[in-house]
Image (cartoon, grey):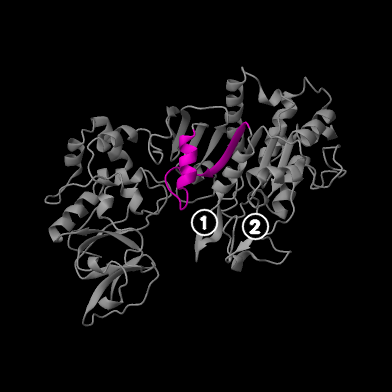
Amino acid sequence: MNQQAGFTLRGRNPDVLTCIANLSNDEVFTPPEFANRMLDTLAEAWAARNGGANIWADSTVTFLDPFTKSGVFLREITTRLIAGLAAEIPDLQNRVDHILTRQMFGIGITTLTSLLARRSLYCSKHANGEHSVAKGFATDSGNIWFERTEHSWKNAKCEFCGAPRALFDREPELENHAYAFIHTNDIKARIRELFGADMQFDVIIGNPPYQMTGGAGGSSDSSIYHLFVEQALKLDARFVSMVIPSRWVAGGRGMDEFRKTMLTGGHISHLVDYTRMSTAFPGVDFEGGVGYFLYDSKYRGECEYTLFQGDNQLPTIKRDLSAQDVFVRDHFAVGILDKVIAHSEPPISDILTNREPFKLESNFRGFHNSAKENDVAIYYTDRGRRSIGYMARNSIEKNQDLIDKWKVLVPKAYGERGAIPAMVLGKPIVAGPPSVCTGSYLFFYCDGEAEANSITEYYSTKFFRFLVSLRKITQDAFRPMYSWVPQQTWNRAWTDADLYQKYGLTPAEVEYVESVIRPMEIEMGLPL
């Protein structure tokens, strides 16, 4: 009975991994239910590729979680293997020892999470301790490795993960978040050092850290989840399955090459996508949602795509992930987009500036409240409130030729946490010359007030914002997010009815756009 307590009786007691608090939004613990959903997907794909074989009844399959936190993936896989291998290895203790010593492997990301993972898997933080369910280990760590790894500093940043030295060059007693799996130029050699020269993993699965604090400079964080995916793919496992933020399919700084590789390779057999993070991870909330993929190294073809739009699961369909340079999550929208693209009109992004159009950061405050001679108006935001200040024209270093243009200012960021229906974009401001703005805004530059008003009315339509939503997956709305919105003639007012008719939307398509985009009320002539 004692031998079975760690696994067969666990279901009778509250599962601590269902309520453990997350360390941060960077290192999110995976709920057991979500982990099991991923394992179900893996098992279905394994059976499809192996004549219906049960992966949980195969004593030769090896698994690696290279960034284990709570140990939930290793624990749930072990539970399935214990049931699946009962016929092949009847003795429970022998079966547990075989699974834990020869099939299950993990790499901790911090001292704390390595202890949590060992406790979840071995029922003891000491793999060779008296309370461990495994009896075949000679070391304290078992197959869950963790040792402090140091950053490799180059020009004040780590050359592997981008961590700023000022924040993470810490004393040995403090965690430095230098994750071993991505701090190497030769991951295969690193794995040989950790687990032996003959180790080859069949399945790599887990939920990596998402971002590095300050990695993008200043207060901006940098994404690092793609670095873990890239390292895993280098290990030539049959299957790789990971939880990562959904923003990779359409946005993210420095994600272009990663996205191109993932979308065009044809190896992603399954993609499950949640527009609202909290639907998948209760109590966790960040913009853009989250999802998981299953990468099959021997598969080439279309992907089985499942979208949870808010709390509603849409039907799973086959999708060609490489159809566009970014992936359109909303498959009902694909037909609408195709109709728009067929017109071959220039994109409105051609008349839209990029970030910090006048080289003034969002927190720039080098202006005054009253206008002086030769001043220009500067539009800025302060704690979410839109305001106007004034500054000398000759102090503007960038885009001086745009100072005397009429402008439609649009917020660079607008977040809704996956809400449906969505506004997508913040309200615009019509700004007359001479004027500039801080990095809180981008702007469309116009030839006169009438053109600015026409663009503003077009911007406020559901049609316009629907097309932006297909590329805007986080709160940021930079120039590339507008590249599927076609330019119009700017000598008239545009309405949704006009646009639906022009692009030949069916009644069902019109109804869909109307259902997912909220109205935007604008008041012409009132800039703030």
Q: Looking at the rendering, which quadrant does residue 14 occupy?
A: top right
Q: Nearer the viewer, residue 98 or 115?
A: 98
**Which mark identifies residue 97?**
none
Q: Looking at the rendering, which quadrant does residue 33 occupy?
A: top right
Q: Residue under circle 2?
A: 177
Note whether 276 is above or below 456 in the view shown. above
For the residue labelled by badge 2, is the local secondary structure a helix, a strand or a loop?
loop
Q: Where is residue 470 in the image (x, y as percent from the top left)?
A: 35, 42
Single out the residue that lies furthest toward the top: 51
Q: How dense is the environment of label 1, judged by Cα within 10 Å: few (below 14), some, or many (20 and up)?
A: many
Q: Give the range drawn in magenta.
A: 238-265
For the residue labelled by badge 1, is the local secondary structure a helix, a strand or a loop?
strand
Q: Position of residue 471 (x, y in %)?
A: 37, 45
Q: Quadrant of the C terminus?
A: bottom left
Q: Nearer the viewer, residue 30 or 52?
A: 52
Asked whether, in this view, residue 517 is left or right of residue 142, the answer is left
Residue 356 visible from this viewpoint:
yes
Q: Does the magenta stretch include residue 304?
A: no
Note whether 276 is above or below 2 in the view shown. below
Name which residue lies at 36% across and 60% down: 355
Q: Is residue 258 magenta?
A: yes
**Total count of labels:** 2
Q: Mark 1 and mark 2: span between their CA atoms?
A: 14 Å
Asked whether, in this view, residue 442 is left or right of residue 314, the answer is left
Q: How dense is the environment of label 2, judged by Cα within 10 Å: few (below 14), some, or many (20 and up)?
A: many
Q: In which quarter of the image is the N terminus?
A: top right
Q: Residue under circle 1?
A: 222
Name which residue lies at 64% across and 60% down: 152
Q: Position of residue 248 (x, y in %)?
A: 47, 45
| Dot 1 amino acid type | Ser
| Dot 2 amino acid type | His
Single out the residue that lies furthest toward the bottom: 373
